[in-house]
Amino acid sequence: MSKMMKFESGFSQEEALAEASRCLQCKKPLCRQGCPVNNAIPQFIRALKEGEYAQGLEAIYRHSYLPAVCGRVCPQEKQCEASCILARKGKAIRIGKLEQFIADNATEVGFPKVAATMGAIAVIGSGPAGLAAAVQLAQLGYAVTIFEGEAEPGGVLLHGIPEYRLPKDVVRRDIKKIENLGVEFRLNTLVGVDLFLDDLLAQGYQAVFIGTGAGLPKTLELPGEYLEGVISALYVLQTINLYNSGQLPEQELPVEKGEHVVVIGAGNVAMDAARTASRLGAEVTVLARRGLNDMAARDIERDEAIADGVKIRTYAAPLAILGEENVTGIKCVNTMVSPEGKAIIKEEESFVLPADKVIFAIGQRPYARIVTTSQGFEINKQGLLICNEHGMTTREGVFAAGDVVHGPATVVKAMGEGRRIAIEMHAYLLRKRLQSAK
């Protein structure tokens, strides 16, 4: 690959200690309020400052099960760090990098193992929601089996985030800790194809958790959308990860050196796909309907994409993909932002960009394998599972969390929801036991 720029390395020990020393240890820590999982931030920072890395990781594990991952990919600048009292002076504590440091330097610390005396639960999907649910349920005393369609667990963490942003060894290390907790992984097993949800219930699982994410790319229904050379961002990211792991030959890569690539979308996935294509040697342009500061992507992801050679064409939207069999270009139109913040198309101001490949990165929706092969599920117009406030779907005893319920969001939100719904599953099963005992 041609472009291999390196950005944002983790803290050294000296840097981590210096940063931890800046923490004010507030009596009412606003940083915790800004964290979607209410992480024990002051506690793990204090432990780091005292050199007690194991104690710091144990504090994190009470709330977050993937600290090495979240420390790297969470948008802390919009969450915990944004809420830090020092952010008012533009000097917020780098909480994410401190969390990453602890997770990377206390690798011997694992989850406390609990005897499985509460029965068996099936978890479908091994992304952040499924992994978090599995940890919580195992710690509550359940025998947990995760069913994963891929040859290796990790879901989007392993297959949908580039190596330079989230090293695969980091993901594998966290998954190994979950295995050591007693969680069983059934790989190469696609529920809805290789076996069905009804089969799981017939096998004696007391309840089922669905955490299959949203892996089906959305499109815009543009003219030319089905031409050869139109691909999804997820396909690009999954393919490059398979190539990097030695499972695909170089000729199977989705982008070639010297090609003109246009990415439609302005979120983090769009930046990942754009940077990946750029590192493969392509000339990459991202179309963003709004300005640089209004993009959905994190500022750091946008800035590093630009540093990687990606061009961002702001205030632009696609109209049609051009070509007869293969993509040759994309017709675009200029946009403006209304006072209400809506991107408005200026139809009289169109232009054409040359393109050999067009990458869609405008969001994902769930696959329908489970709901179309089982009875009793209801979904909304976006194809998302409908659940009650306790996380139970419209199918009795089947729960769900993460992107399959609320659509694509952050890793920490999916993880937090997986943990919360696991506790709801436990309460549901306890109620059933009490009712049976009467």
Image: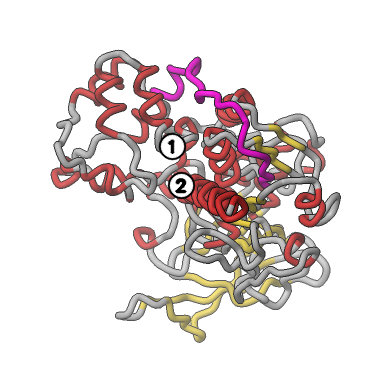
Residue 43 vs residue 89: left or right? Answer: right
Is residue 269 at least partly visible in the picture?
no
Q: Badge 1: how crowded within 10 Å, few (<14), some, or many (20+)?
A: many
Q: Which residue is mark 1?
A: 64
Q: Nearer the viewer, residue 399 or 284?
A: 399
The answer to whether residue 287 is magenta is no
Q: Are marks 2 and 1 in contact (CB under 8 Å)?
A: yes
- The residue sitting at 80% across, 64% down in the picture is 373
Residue 410, how many percent across, how many down?
48, 50
Residue 197, how many percent across, how many down?
77, 55
Is residue 412 at least partly visible in the picture?
yes
- Residue 421's place in the image compared with 407, above or below, is above
- The residue sitting at 71% across, 48% down in the picture is 255
Q: Alpha-carbon distance for marks 2 and 1?
A: 7 Å
Q: What amino acid is labelled 2 in the image? A: Gly
Q: Which residue is mark 2?
A: 416
| First to last magenta residue range | 101-124
